[in-house]
Amino acid sequence: MWWLIPAGIGLAVVYSVVSEQEKQAYQRWQQKKNEVEDLLGEVRLEVHSHLYEARQSYNFQHLRGLHSSSVNAADQAYQLLKDSGESLHAINKMLTQSREQRSRFKGKLERAHLRKDFIQVKELKHSSSKLKAYIGSLFREKEKIKKQRNRFRKEVRMLNRRTCELKETIRDYCGEQGEKWYLQKHGRRAPKQLYINPHTFKVELR
Amino acid sequence: MKSKKYKNLPEIRDLVPINSSRGRNPLQAFHQTTGNRWVSVLCALNPLGPIAEAYGRTLAYKLEVKRLDVELEGVKGHAIAARYMIDSQLRLKIEELNQRHSGLRAIEQSINGELRTLQIERAEVLKMARDTHREALQAGLSNEERDFLYKMAMDLIRQLPTFGDRARMTLQNMIKALPPVPSVAGLLEE
């Protein structure tokens, strides 16, 4: 039975070698598993951030187009408001001139009464009544234009609100490019920020 | 030929059936007789068992590592494919958006032109109304002439709100053509 001793030692050596190999294989497997899990996490994060950036980029393009259309509509509405204001101003001036003319007619009429120039009195009365009717018509048109101006003013306000809302949405939901765009619209420069240059790995200002 | 000494002994084939004993495993016979109660005990005492198990596990780990290598490559490939898909979808959507915006811009340009024409016409009418009004208030006109000028000025002035109404209708068309402002939730889901 003496041969059992070297056989036992041999088996023990073989077992320890195999066990060592198993341990190494386990460690390699564990390492690889961690590597795969880390990579999966990184990829998931990267794809998510890529998707987020793509969405922001799309939102930026979309909202910028809407903003431009909104600005155009607001400009047109403002132009109409200005035009109606101009018409109103012109009618007001006409009204003032017509009233002045009417008071001049009244003066002439009084003088004609004093002179007892009945032909001129008749003519002046006619002119005065015609001017009165003209003033009345001017006033009615003025009221119409005034109402129109108020409607245009409401539309300008509504479109300005929409433009402002779009501008703020671009600032808040379109990432860095949205913020830069917003600051440019307000004539301001984006504040400089610290960042790590991917080429030189140095902290720089941008 | 049997010697006289073994004459009275029975034949061997009578004692042990030779055919039945050939090929029979004594270990199996032992386990059969003991009702397999010693199998687990003997397996535990077998020194080659743990070695074989350890070797088997090593092989399994190696196989698993190879599978993970393939999976790693697959994940990298998926990442590239996902990025490519996102980029191509983005390009497609931006192209659609540009087409929509160019359509909208064409409508805007046409409406801008219409409004500009109305504005020029209105300015002309206003200028004519002012001139006629100035003429009507001048001295030295007969009643008939003055009446005619008042009437003419009023006709011109009455056109001003009409221009305003037409311009307003055109503006309303422009406002209607504007796409609605997307909600925040809509922006995130799109």
Image (spheres, coloured by chain):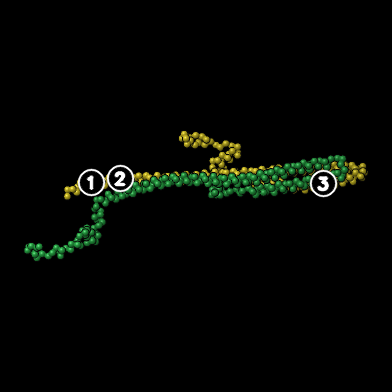
SS at circle 2: helix
- Left or right for A35, reference A203: left
Name the residue carrying label 1. A10
Name the residue carrying label 2. A21
Tell me which amino acid carries mark 3. Lys
Residue A106 is marked as none
- For this rendering, which residue is in front, B67 or A70? B67
Mark 2, mark 3: which one is toward the viewer? 2
Estimate the spatial distance between the alpha carbons at disc 1 and disc 2, rounded to whole Å. 17 Å
Number of dots carrying numbers = 3
- For this rendering, which residue is in front, A126 or A184? A184
Tell me which amino acid carries mark 1. Gly
Q: What shade has chain B been given? A: green
Estimate the spatial distance between the alpha carbons at disc 3 and disc 1, rounded to whole Å. 129 Å
Q: Relative to B33, does residue A203 appear above or below in the rendering?
A: above
The chain carrying label 3 is: B
Q: Position of residue A103 (x, y in %)?
A: 84, 42
- Residue A63 in sight from this viewpoint: no
Residue B151 is marked as 3
Q: Position of residue B29 (x, y in %)?
A: 22, 60
SS at circle 3: helix
Q: Position of residue A108 (x, y in %)?
A: 88, 42
- Left or right for B26, reference B166: left
The chain carrying label 1 is: A
- For this rendering, which residue is in front, B22 or A129? B22
* Same chain check for tags 1 and 2: yes
Q: Relative to B38, does residue A12 appear above or below in the rendering?
A: above
Letter of the chain shown yellow in the rendering: A
